Image: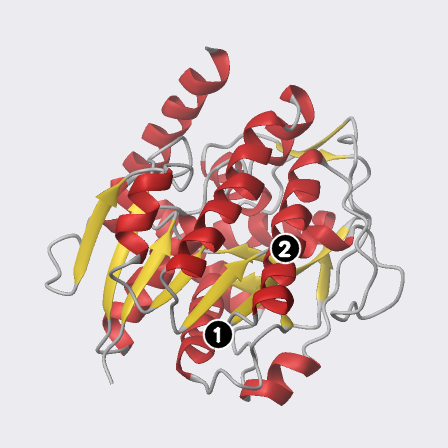
Amino acid sequence: MSKRILVTGGAGFISSNVVRHLLANTPHEVVSLDALTYAGSLANLADVMSHERLSFVHGDIRDVDLVRRVVAEVDVIVNAAAESHVEKSIQEGASEFVTTNVEGTQILLDAIRETPVERFLLISSSEVYGTAEHDPMDEEHPLNPRSPYAATKAGGDRLAYSYAVTYDMPIVIVRPFNNYGPRQHPEKVVPRFIIQALQGDALTIHGDGHASRDWLWVDDHAEALKTLIDAPIGPLAGEVVNLATGVDISVSDIAALVLDTVGNPAASVEYVDERPGQVDRHIGSVDKMERLTGWRARTSFAEGLERTVAWYRENEVWWRELLQRAERVFSS
């Protein structure tokens, strides 16, 4: 049965891949809502903008009247809109992150109190956990966010949970671990390493490179969200689910793999000061998501990285324009 799905932040990295996946693999109509800030670009949707089942709304989830109008016309919401630039949150503080990641979520939640939907998927983040206290990190792991960005994601996460239990709303909280793949903003570590390697520059590593992450191929993430949209809502409502692989890889190993995949294994690596609030280790438990839906990530890091390097190699105009735009934003 066809549904009408709102994807907020729909021109961003993860969400544009979700939009593309839904259009290619379901009969659903998709509404992409995006404010087109530094991380969102219509170039991310260029190949599907003319699709008959896609409509685009230029707007902000903090716009109460707009959100009410859009939400009244959809069946499902995937809230992926977020301020997600960790370093910016550290340098400039949390103000803009609070308004989007917490207040924007609140506006959406209040809109579905007025006009109920079939389900609401909140895209939270594994960053809410902080550094792993046990291995692997399951959904009961303590929340110890270590950056202003992560703290605001935890705020939106717990706000959504409170609406689920207070108002008996069909909300699912999704905590994806570190995504990578095509169209990811160059401030993130995997595309940053790839672009540095392609340009023959030294790969810059914060700290000594031992910090590790669980790396999730973005198309596997999109497939997981489709699974959560199509599965019966009863067992999922009010639940938190990790999206992960159960394998972690260190930043130093990522750098070596990027250099090898790009074909420049002898290029230099430069170690710079550790970023404040750095998370030491992330590795996610995949048991709950598999138990509730049957989904597991299917793409190895080596396979996903090869595809990602190929995309950045073939789309230099895309990432150069984004780097220039980000430089203008952060220098203003």
> Do we see residue 315 in this rendering?
no
- Does residue 253 appear to the left or right of 23 in the view shown? right
Q: Dot 1, how many residues are within 10 Å of its Cα: few (below 14), some (14-19), or many (20+)?
A: many
In the rendered view of the protein, which quadrant contains the N terminus? bottom left
The residue under the point 53% across, 58% down is 123
- Does residue 8 appear to the left or right of 186 in the view shown? left
Q: What kind of residue is marked 1? A: Ala
* Mark nearer the viewer, 1 or 2: 2
Disc 1 on helix, strand or loop?
Answer: helix
The residue under the point 46% across, 45% down is 107
- Image coordinates for residue 326, horizontal then vertical, percent: 43, 25
Residue marked by disc 2? 157
Q: What kind of residue is marked 2? A: Asp
Residue 224's disc number: 1
The residue under the point 40% across, 75% down is 226
- Image coordinates for residue 184, horizontal then vertical, percent: 45, 46
- Image coordinates for residue 66, horizontal then vertical, percent: 29, 42
Nearest to the observer: residue 72 or residue 37: 72
Label 1 to label 2: alpha-carbon separation = 18 Å
Snapshot colouring = secondary structure
Q: In the rendered image of this protein, does residue 91 appear above or below residue 45?
A: above
